[in-house]
């Protein structure tokens, strides 16, 4: 058998704009963009980082209705700083019923929920 | 700034079972599993494959209602063979209105949609 994860594909009203948000959020590369789709990845080619995931934003006009069942959990060095930076890029804090937790629940400009985890412990 | 993609987190009614399906589907490793969560990744440690995504299945009893907005696109060497293998693991073909396309739309045992792309061209 050979079956590789080719992309994580994400429905989007505006693929180029959403790829812009996420490439800045994660400091990833925009590898391709057109009116209908945009591809981002943590490296400029697959050869550079074999096994790295690429995210493909695909134009889809269906409205988002419920909380997504798939989401990113992001690990920051400084949670407060990264939350503020992401708000500056167009994300917002959101409430999915999380109550008192160590992570911050946010939504990207199209409402896709994600979490910014507690800051990593300082090392060294 | 430092913000890393820690995991792709997936709501699941049965995290251990769903991690079992996907680890077999992708030939990935189960790195951790408990009653409430299970973690799979393409390598046994992060150092081995920088940039690779780990998938964390999290217990969530909310029913899946709509088509997911986030899904995997998988690249097979042999589409027919891989589709049959995935059916043997508990996936099924599903219809999201895709009509006549080169990829096969399937759903995992909890209904999460994914696509098996057209077979890769043989290289020689």
Image (tube, coloured by chain):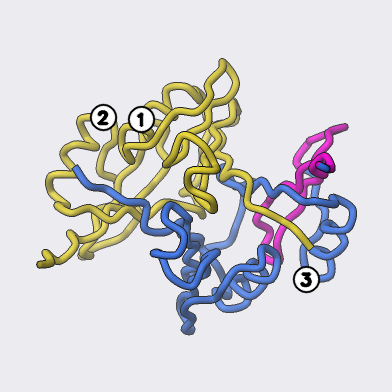
Chain colours: A yellow, B blue
User: Mark 1 touching mark 2, by CB under 8 A?
Assistant: yes
**Farthest residue, direction bottom:** B35
Subunit that carries the residue with mark 3: B
Q: Is residue A109 a member of the stretch shown in magenta?
A: no
| Residue beneath the point at 47% across and 56% down | B53
Region of the chain picked out in magenta, as a range: B96-123
Majority secondary structure in the magenta region: loop
Q: Which residue is mark 3?
A: B89
Q: What SS does tag 2 mark? A: helix
Q: Nearer the viewer, residue A84 or B11?
A: A84
Q: Which residue is mark 2?
A: A89
Residues flagged by tags 3 and 1 on a common chain: no
Screen quadrant of the C terminus of chain A: bottom left
In space, the residues marked 2 and 3 are separated at their CA atoms by 41 Å
In space, the residues marked 3 and 1 are separated at their CA atoms by 36 Å
Left or right for A93, reference A41: left
């Amino acid at each position: 058998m050979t079956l590789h994860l080719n992309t994580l594909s994400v429905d989007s009203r505006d693929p180029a704009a959403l790829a812009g948000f996420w490439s800045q959020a994660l400091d990833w590369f925009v590898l391709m963009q057109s009116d209908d789709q945009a591809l981002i990845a943590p490296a400029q080619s697959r050869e550079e980082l074999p096994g790295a995931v690429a995210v493909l934003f695909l134009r889809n006009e269906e409205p988002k209705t419920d909380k997504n069942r798939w989401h990113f959990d992001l690990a920051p060095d400084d949670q407060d700083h990264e939350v503020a930076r992401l708000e500056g890029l167009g994300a917002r804090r959101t409430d999915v019923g999380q109550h008192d937790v160590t992570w911050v629940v946010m939504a990207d400009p199209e409402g896709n929920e994600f979490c910014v985890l507690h800051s990593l412990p300082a090392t060294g």
